Image (cartoon, rainbow, N blue to C red):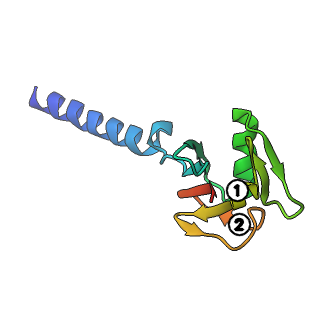
Amino acid sequence: MNKKILIVIVIIVFFSAFLLFFSPFSKKEEGKLVLILDYGNNHKQAFQLFTSEQKRAWSLLQEVAAVSKIDLEATNDFYPKKIDSLKDGTDNKHWALYVNGIKQKSSPLDTVVKPPAEVTFRFE
């Protein structure tokens, strides 16, 4: 009887190990990208996107705008001309791009981010 219990325990351990390592539930969570729209007046919106691929900051903004029905216009070099009702240059403020808290000098089209990352468009 002890052999039967031992065999059952070994089978359970191997089956559990198989499920743990080869099951679709064991896959690692894909990378998370957070896009924040900071309107500069203590109003922010945050959006989470999950992807394993790197993406351009402009593409992220376009995806969020399409899904969330945010009014978005771009200049010829893909800087935001308008996000919602805030036009670039209003009250001497401009839309600035930050990735992981660092202000970017390149345009949103040229800025490529890889998850995990936080992308912020701030009106300042």
Q: Residue at x 79, y 45 (%)?
A: 72
Q: Between disc 1 and disc 2, whose residue precedes?
A: 1
Q: Amino acid at mark 2?
A: Thr
Quarter holding the C terminus is bottom right
Write down the quadrant of residue 7 in the picture.
Answer: top left
What residue is disc 1 on?
91
Quarter holding the N terminus is top left
Q: Amino acid at mark 1?
A: Asp
Depicted 67 relative to depicted 92: above or below: above
Write down the quadrant of residue 77 in the picture.
Answer: bottom right
Density class for disc 2 (Cα within 10 Å; few <14, some 14-19, many ≥20) is some
Tell me residue 89's x, y (percent): 76, 58
Q: Is residue 86 visible?
A: yes
Depicted 38 relative to depicted 99: above or below: above
Q: Residue at x 16, y 35 (%)?
A: 6
Depicted 7 relative to depicted 59: above or below: above
Tell me residue 30's x, y (percent): 54, 48
Tell me residue 39's x, y (percent): 61, 48
Density class for disc 1 (Cα within 10 Å; few <14, some 14-19, many ≥20) is few
What residue is disc 2 on?
111
Q: Of all residues shown, which one is farthest toward the front?
A: 91
Closest to the observer, 114 or 120:
120
The label on residue 35 is none
Closest to the observer, 53 or 41:
41
Closest to the observer, 6 or 84:
84
Q: Of all residues shown, which one is farthest toward the left?
A: 2
Q: Residue at x 76, y 37 (%)?
A: 66
Q: How many marks?
A: 2
46 to the left or right of 22: right
Closest to the observer, 122 or 33:
122
